[in-house]
Image (cartoon, rainbow, N blue to C red):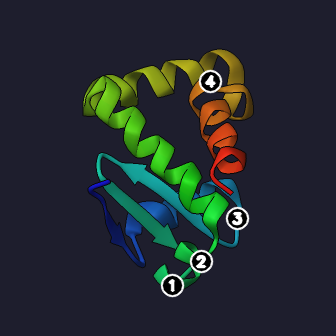
Amino acid sequence: MDYKIVENSVLARIARVVLKSDNVAMVLGKAIHLSGVKKESFLKNKSWFAHECCHIRQFQRYGFFKFLWLYLIESIKVGYYHNKFEVEARQAETENS
């Protein structure tokens, strides 16, 4: 899988503040943005890495802007936790651990 990792991402930092979380990984296209966690620690966490790789595949499946739109609409309708894209990513965590 083709991806890059961005440490100390401003975008992930914003998400971290909004989510009130100690650490965040988020995907935009083929880039995994990290805040509050170093690349080495993130990569050692197989389930977290699998979760984010699932989001990369979702971006590839739908295209960049279409996926963002679908993700946003899904989150508005059912919330973050029940968002079908997050459900799929959580399933990937256990399938690849």
Q: Which residue is mark 2?
A: 44
Asked whether the beta carbons under mark 3 and mark 4 sit within 8 Å of each other, the answer is no
What residue sits 62% from the left and 43% below the top? 92
Q: Position of residue 48 (x, y in %)?
A: 62, 60
Residue 36 visible at all: no
- Which numbered mark, 4 or 2, is in the foreground of this view? 2
What residue sits 27% from the left and 34% below the top? 64
Rendered image: mark on residue 80: none
Asked where in the image residue 78 lies, by quadrant, the reply is: top right
What residue sits 41% from the left and 64% below the top? 33
Asked where in the image residue 23 lies, by quadrant, the reply is: bottom right
Element type at mark 2: helix
- Which numbered mark, 4 or 1, is in the foreground of this view? 1
Element type at mark 1: helix
Q: Which residue is mark 4?
A: 84
**Which quarter shows the C terminus?**
bottom right
Residue type pointed to by label 2: Lys
Q: Which residue is mark 1?
A: 40
Residue type pointed to by label 1: Glu
Rendered image: mark on residue 21: 3
The tag earlier along the polypeptide, 1 or 3, is 3
Category of crowding for the residue at label 4, using alpha-carbon neighbours closer than 10 angstroms: few (below 14), some (14–19), many (at least 20): some
| Mark 1 → mark 3, Cα distance in angstroms | 19 Å
Residue type pointed to by label 3: Ser
| Mark 4 → mark 1, Cα distance in angstroms | 29 Å
Q: Nearer the viewer, residue 93 or 13?
A: 93
Asked whether the beta carbons under mark 1 and mark 2 sit within 8 Å of each other, the answer is yes
The tag earlier along the polypeptide, 3 or 2, is 3
| Mark 3 → mark 4, Cα distance in angstroms | 22 Å
Category of crowding for the residue at label 3, using alpha-carbon neighbours closer than 10 angstroms: few (below 14), some (14–19), many (at least 20): few
